């Protein structure tokens, strides 16, 4: 069944002909479209409307193209007959952007709209997205564009996640184990990465890390679990050679002499640690 549409003309006293003046549009719901025009306030408030043609959508699109073959005729911004692509490539001016920003200030989503935004994705849609993106890789050009776009992006800087959100994320991943195939992929992806090599923490960062861990004692249950998980495991024959190769040329800490106070603190920390195990 063909969809019935109409081609309409919006005009005022200063307009003389549909070919050159006013606004030409197509719609299948004229009252709704007129309401949208009134609310947008793009056109003079005294504009009138005239239906030029009624028929199926293809005929209406063809007529709209004949009346608006180019951009910027009359009140129309874009070329006619392009349907959903009518505003493709159009850029808002800084003034228009500022007006839109001011208009949105203070507006909050209703509980109903928030519920729609938080609606979980169906398993079918998830499967479709996974199938579509599996194996796809971004090109170097795409990665470069993403990198440039993120330069100076500070929208999440200083934002701390709530304990509830952290626990939700932790609970989601708790108990999950990577497959051997996934582990191998991660190992290969990280080969040769030395992004933290040679980076030294500032005194302030070290003090913060020390304060965060001070007084923390690993529970006996956790120690027992770690011990049980490692029991019976043997290091590969080439383990020592790999460690040696990784450490080759690393002079961090070489020639450093710890003060008596530092050595005493380390001794006290180890003594406290082993005394808690007994």
Image: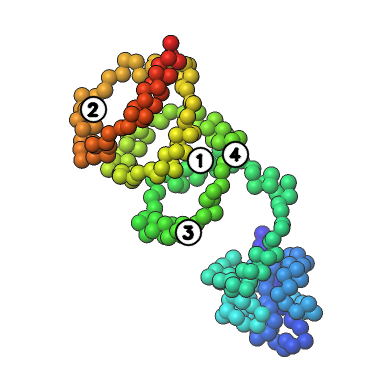
For disc 4, the neighbor class at 10 Å (few under 14, some 14 to 19, many from 20) is few
User: What separation in Å lies between label 1 and label 4 (alpha carbons)?
Assistant: 31 Å
Q: Earlier in the sequence, mark 2 or mark 1?
A: 1
Quadrant into which the N terminus falls: bottom right
Mark carried by residue 162: 4
- Are the residues tagged 1 and 4 within 8 Å (C-beta)? no
Which residue is disc 2 drawn over?
239
Q: Which element carries disc 3, helix, strand or loop?
A: loop
- Name the one closer to the observer, 135 or 156: 156
Q: Earlier in the sequence, mark 2 or mark 4?
A: 4
Q: Earlier in the sequence, mark 3 or mark 2?
A: 3
- Are the residues tagged 3 and 2 within 8 Å (C-beta)? no
Q: Position of residue 9 (x, y in %)?
A: 72, 78
- Quick one: which residue is furthest to the top in this view? 278
Q: Position of residue 250 (x, y in %)?
A: 24, 39
For disc 2, the neighbor class at 10 Å (few under 14, some 14 to 19, many from 20) is few
Please tell me which residue is depicted at 41% across the width and 23% down the height of the picture: 269
User: What separation in Å lies between label 4 and label 3 (alpha carbons)?
Assistant: 25 Å
Q: Earlier in the sequence, mark 1 or mark 4?
A: 1
Q: Earlier in the sequence, mark 4 or mark 3?
A: 3
């Amino acid at each position: 069944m063909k969809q019935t549409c109409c081609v309409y003309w919006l005009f005022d006293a200063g307009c003389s002909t549909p070919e050159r003046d006013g606004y030409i549009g197509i719609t299948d719901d004229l009252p709704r479209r007129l309401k949208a025009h009134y609310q947008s306030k793009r056109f003079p408030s005294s504009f009138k409307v005239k239906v030029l043609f009624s028929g199926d959508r293809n005929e209406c699109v063809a007529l709209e193209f004949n009346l608006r073959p180019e951009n910027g005729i009359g009140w129309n911004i874009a070329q006619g007959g392009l349907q959903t692509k009518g505003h493709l490539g159009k850029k808002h001016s800084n003034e228009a952007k500022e007006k839109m920003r001011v208009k949105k200030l203070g507006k909050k989503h209703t509980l109903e709209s928030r519920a729609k935004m938080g609606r979980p994705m169906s398993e079918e849609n998830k499967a479709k997205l996974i199938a579509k993106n599996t194996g796809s890789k971004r090109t170097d050009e795409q990665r470069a564009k993403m990198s440039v776009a993120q330069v100076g992006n500070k929208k999440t800087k200083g934002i701390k996640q709530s304990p509830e959100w952290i626990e939700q994320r932790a609970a989601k991943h708790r108990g999950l184990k990577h497959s051997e195939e996934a582990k191998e992929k991660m190992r290969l992806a990280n080969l040769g990465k030395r992004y933290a090599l040679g980076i030294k923490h500032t005194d302030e960062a070290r003090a913060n890390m020390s304060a965060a861990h001070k007084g923390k004692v690993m529970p006996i249950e956790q120690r027992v679990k770690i011990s049980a998980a490692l029991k019976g495991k043997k290091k590969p024959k080439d383990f020592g050679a790999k460690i040696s190769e990784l450490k080759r040329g690393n002079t961090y800490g070489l020639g450093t002499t710890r003060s008596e106070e530092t050595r005493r603190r380390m001794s006290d920390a180890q003594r406290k640690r082993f005394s808690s195990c007994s």
